[in-house]
Each structure stands twice: as C-alpha cells, then as structure tokens.
Image (cartoon, helix red, strand yellow):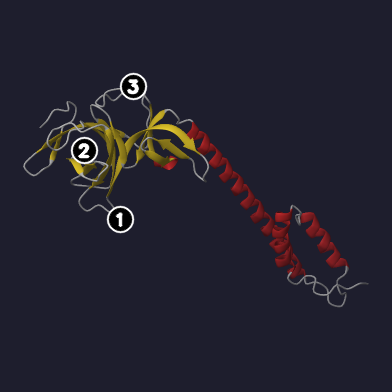
C-alpha cells in the first residue's frame, strides 16, 4: 500500500490558496476535487497511524465554510454591480430635469433665483451669504424658517443697496451659530440645477449641469424643467418624500446692522 505522509496537514490552507489562484485562471478547485483528494487520502493513509476522525471532520467543515464564504463574496459583488447599473439608469432618467442638490454654485437669471438650505439639528439663527465670482459679498439673507429639513427661498437678485445684480453665476454659503464639524447642528446650502447630461466614466455617475457636476447622492429633489418666474412654485414638481422642502420668498432690504429681511409669500420689502 502506498503511503502519502502528511497529506492532511495544512491541506485546508493549501486548498484555499489554490482556490484563489484557480479563480484567477478560471480553473477552480471545487467540492468534487476536494472529495476526490479526500478519498485518496483515506485510501493511502498509514494503517498504523490512521487519520484522526476529529481532524478529518474539521477539514471537511473548514472547506464547507470556505466554499460558502467564497460564494457569498461572489453574490455580494454581483449585487453591487446590479446596484451600480441601477444608479446609472436612474441618473440617465434625470437628463432634462431640474434637481435640488447640495451645492454652492447657482445661476441668477433676470428676476431672481431660487436657492435653499438644509438644517440638521436645532439652530437659533441662520445666515445665507451670496458672493459673486470675484468672491465679494453681494447679499446677506436671514431666513425666518429654522426648522429641521430642507427649505427653499426665492431671492430677488438685489444687492444690499437694493440694486439689481447682473445675471450670472454666484456662490451661496449657509452658516448658523454653533454649527460646524464639531457640532450636532449643521446647515448645508442647496441649489437648483438643470441636468444636461450624465458622466458615467467613473465609479459613480455624475450629473452634468451648468452649475457644475454633482453626485447622485447629493440630489434632494427632482422637478420638471420649465420656464417660470422665480416666485412661482410650478406645477408637476416632484421631490424626495424624505426631504420635504418649504418655500419662502426673500427680498433684500438692509437694516441698520446690515441684516436683510425675509418675508414669506409676497416678496415685498420689510
């Protein structure tokens, strides 16, 4: 009888290594191969020193667990690939739509612009600063709606002297006392953008807009593109059910401290 010494020792680790190499080469060490080798081991064991039954059972259990782990990883990868494909299709469906996204750049057209902010936590005051492309502050707004959630406001496009600003690209920032990286309360600026295309060259689809490129995860709401006055909410709008948006009209009017007043609805100066 031929004796193959030490065939049982270290077999499980070797099988795992061979299995991983086999995956790359397309030549896998499957369960059938394992059982064939196991039977060969039993046939050629030393009759004076037979394989320990406990060790034999342990090897079989370890291989079974390894096989399940490999299959689970494969299934997870397939699920992730399906999710990515679904996200890409969702991004394509947003072309020619208007989205509300977490961002800072927005377009001011004649008559004003709709912008927004997201409140997380409790804040007692809120300041929205609008800057031109040169970095100069052109307007400072203090909306009255400070509740948690997403809020949109319609800015009339006037500077702090009440003069209309030229159409173009502007930057928005939102701050609140006590908010920041180390605080539980944060304020995030929101902007509206018209989706003109989708870039799918990277690992995550990017929405292409005149305001810049945005990830799909930054989208807070989706709307039909239509030309309307900034103060009109529009018809047929859709928005994320978990991200309700309240709309307020904000007009620029400075008081003695340089603060601007926010009025809901009419848009008149206070």
N-term mark: 2 or 3: 2
| CA neighbours of label 3 inside 10 A, class few (<14), some (14 to 19), many (20+) | few
Which quadrant holds residue 133?
A: top left
Find disc 2 in the rendering and name its residue: 145
N-term mark: 2 or 1: 2
In the displayed image of the protein, which residue is found farthest to the bottom? 48
Mark number for residue 102?
Answer: none
SS for dot 3: loop
Per the model, the C-alpha gap separating discs 2 and 1 is 22 Å
* Residue 151 visible, this orientation: no
Which quadrant holds residue 119?
A: top left
Q: Say above or below: 4 vs 127.
A: below
* Residue 77 shown left or right of residue 58 in the figure: left
Between 248 and 56, the one nearer to me in the picture = 248
Q: Nearer the viewer, mark 2 or mark 3?
A: 3
Give x and y (percent) for residue 222.
Answer: 39, 31
* Residue that appears at 83% across and 59% down: 36
* Residue 161 shown left or right of residue 226 in the figure: left
Picture quarter with the C terminus? top left
Find disc 3 in the rendering and name its residue: 235
Q: Say above or below: 51 vs 186.
A: below
Per the model, the C-alpha gap separating discs 1 and 3 is 37 Å
Mark number for residue 181?
Answer: 1
* Residue 36 shown left or right of residue 236 in the figure: right
In the displayed image of the protein, which residue is found farthest to the left? 256
SS for dot 2: loop
């Amino acid at each position: 009888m031929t004796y193959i010494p030490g065939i049982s020792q270290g077999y499980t680790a070797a099988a795992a290594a061979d299995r991983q190499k086999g995956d790359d080469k397309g030549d896998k060490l499957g369960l059938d191969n394992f059982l064939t080798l196991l039977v060969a081991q039993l046939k050629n064991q030393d009759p004076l020193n037979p394989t320990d039954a406990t060790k034999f059972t342990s090897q079989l259990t370890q291989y079974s667990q390894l096989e399940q782990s490999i299959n689970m990883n494969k299934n997870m990868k397939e699920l992730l690939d399906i999710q990515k494909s679904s996200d890409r299709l969702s991004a394509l469906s947003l072309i020619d739509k208007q989205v509300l996204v977490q961002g800072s750049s927005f377009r001011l057209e004649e008559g004003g612009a709709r912008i927004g902010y997201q409140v997380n936590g409790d804040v007692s005051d809120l300041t929205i600063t609008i800057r031109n492309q040169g970095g100069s502050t052109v307007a400072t707004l203090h909306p009255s709606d400070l509740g948690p959630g997403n809020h949109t406001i319609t800015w009339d496009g006037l500077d702090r002297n009440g003069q209309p600003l030229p159409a173009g690209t502007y930057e928005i920032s939102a701050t609140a006392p006590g908010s920041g990286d180390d605080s539980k309360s944060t304020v995030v600026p929101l902007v509206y953008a018209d989706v003109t295309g989708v870039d799918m060259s990277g690992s995550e689809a990017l929405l292409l807009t005149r305001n810049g490129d945005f990830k799909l995860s930054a989208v807070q709401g989706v709307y039909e593109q239509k030309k309307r006055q900034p103060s009109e909410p529009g018809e047929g709008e859709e928005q994320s059910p978990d991200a309700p948006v309240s709309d307020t009209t904000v007009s620029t009017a400075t008081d003695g401290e340089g603060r601007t007043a926010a009025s809901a609805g009419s848009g008149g100066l206070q």
